[in-house]
Amino acid sequence: MCGIVGYVGKSEAPPILIQGLRRLEYRGYDSAGMAILNGSGIAVRKTVGRIANLEASVASEPIHGSLGISHTRWATHGSVTRENAHPHFDHTGQLALVHNGVIENYQTLRTQLEEKGHTFLSQTDTEVLAHLIGCELDQAGPPSKAALVQAIRAALRQIIGTYGIAVIHAGIPGLMVGARRGSPLVLGIGKGEHFLASDAAAMVSHTRDVVYIKDYEIVALQDDSFDISTLQGAGAGYEVSKIEYTEKDVSKGIYPHYMLKEIFEQPDTIRDAMRGRLSHEEATAILGGLEMTNAELRDVERIVLTGCGTALHSAMVGEYMIESLAHLPVECEFASELRYRNLPMTKDTLVFVISQSGETADTLAALRECQRKGHRTLGICNGVGSTIARETDGGVYMHCGPEIGVAATKSFTSQLVVHALIALLLGRIHHLSHGEGLTIIHELEQLPGKVTQVLELNDPIARIAKKYAQAKVFLFMGRQFNYPIALEGALKLKEISYIAATGYPSAELKHGVIALVGEDTPSVVIAPRDAVFDKNVSNIEAVRARQGPRNARGPNGDAHDVILIPDAPEYLTPILTSIALQLLSYHISVELGCDVDKPRNLAKSVTVE
């Protein structure tokens, strides 16, 4: 959830580290710091709050050096204080470390180290790891590259938990060492310089050649070389990958916020999710990344879709899509709960794990639990080179480009498109005719244009948002395919405006929810003209009878405010309705003066359990 940026080369490190940290602001953080090897030791700067505070600290007391590590912290162990901010030092003050992840047995290790005379300055698990490595280095001999790598290897063997770390030592100039288990770490390869970061976005201004470090690997990097080994000590092979996006892709451009930019990118990202994947000749979807033949897919008797947050809401829409088009039973599971459940799954069950980043800790745990029990597991993710992409048996990339805004927008609709493609493929294998397949393909190809029509409603939606922005509670309601969109719409509003919002199936209104309806509680009813349109109209009338303000998505004149979306088949309306709700949440947040792209307490990629 935090951000790591490291640099070793010939340029001044502090500006490069600050720039890299800014690229990772979207990951969520509450403090920031850096440590620079300056020729006479390690200079450190740590501040609470935004990266701008760290930048001001460095400007007021400049530090110089061409090797350094930096970090943005999202508090887990210990409150938000300067003392708890990273980097942390060992007992000698010569070794500095930044860390993402959670050391689960840190308290036991801390007690053992305290008994040896170690004194700790923070409440963090990270400082315990720094002391542990320093203690092992004492036993490894004089500081050297080999000794530091050996000490890190010995310390990490004692760790229970997850980590992505970067380590420097005042007595070993020109060297940085990184390691990972369960928390992403990327090596950037430059000319006479190298980078280490928790996300490739941090280094895209300097290089597009990267190596995705794997679990239980250690990387030692200098300005002109690097080597990768395993936790056991063996050498490790690696593959140099290209970052698919450019610096322009991770800038806001003409937009005031990343979220708005990413909402408006959706005609293109939806088109990209389908590009090369629709066959008119066979009237089906082509998803070679699944690594399954039609015969193997035909043998699937049950599908489990799992994810967290927005990804789970996309799974719920996918459940409706696959059951409707392919007539296969589908079950959705919270990834955070799946690993702890004894979920009965037959050998004919196919599991899809869904994660934008491909690094979500709970989803990774669910993936590994399903694989442990022998189930074929496929991924739907956006992160090329991510852990989920590497560990699944196959999958589908979303190809929606970097998503910087914490609130998921384009990644959500790309996931919905992928679900529709999977539903089409499975439907054609089972019972859909050639003509029905072509009809679905035609409707999918019309989607980008219909999304553009929804985006043209931006100004009217902004006016509606201004009207209701002061409400303290919102109710979101939808049925069938759009029930998950009610959940997603409520989540978006909560995430970026901090308004209490809840989503319900529309038919549940009379089963208790109606008690919340009143003059001060807007009800957002998602009511496209589908099979349950008349039922939704009845619910709007029920709210109207109790003086509740109403806001509808669809062709309905009985609501106080109506946002008319284009006509589409039932299984594709969630894509259009969700974008309208993204705009509504965005404009309410702006009206309230909230930090749209960096909402409080949230992180883009949840890499700790």
Image (cartoon, helix red, strand yellow):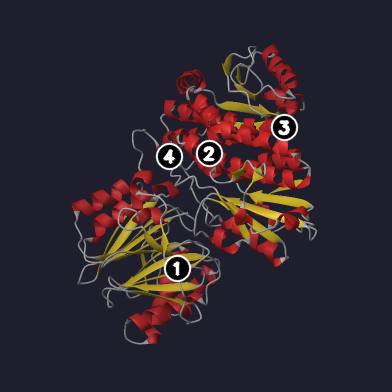
- Where residue 450 sits: x, y (%)? 55, 27
Residue at 56 percent across and 42 percent down: it is 274
Q: Which mark is residue 597?
A: 4
Mark 4 vs 2, N-terminal side: 2
Give the distance between the C-alpha atoms of the residues marked 1 and 3, in whole angstroms: 45 Å
- In the picture, the quarter occupied by the C terminus is bottom right
Mark 2 vs 1, N-terminal side: 1
Vertical placement of residue 26 versus 446, above or below = below
Give the distance between the C-alpha atoms of the residues marked 1 and 4, in whole angstroms: 33 Å
Q: Amino acid at mark 1?
A: Glu
Q: Which residue is mark 1?
A: 239
Q: Are marks 1 and 4 in contact (CB under 8 Å)?
A: no
In the depicted view, which residue is nearer to us: 119 or 54?
54
Circle 2 packing at 10 Å, graded few (<14), some (14-19), many (20+), is: many
Mark 2 vs 3, N-terminal side: 2
Query: Helix, strand, or loop for circle 2?
Result: helix
For discs 4 and 2, the disc positioned in front in the rendered view: 2
For discs 3 and 4, the disc positioned in front in the rendered view: 3
Vertical placement of residue 496 versus 328, above or below = above
Vertical placement of residue 147 versus 424, above or below = below
Q: Quadrant of residue 369?
A: bottom right
Mark 1 vs 3, N-terminal side: 1
Q: Which residue is mark 3?
A: 480
Give the distance between the C-alpha atoms of the residues marked 3 and 4, in whole angstroms: 31 Å
Mark 3 vs 4, N-terminal side: 3
- Where residue 189 sits: x, y (%)? 34, 65
For discs 1 and 3, the disc positioned in front in the rendered view: 1
Vertical placement of residue 286 versus 550, above or below = below
Q: Which residue is mark 2?
A: 270
Q: Amino acid at mark 4?
A: Asp
Q: Are marks 2 and 3 in contact (CB under 8 Å)?
A: no
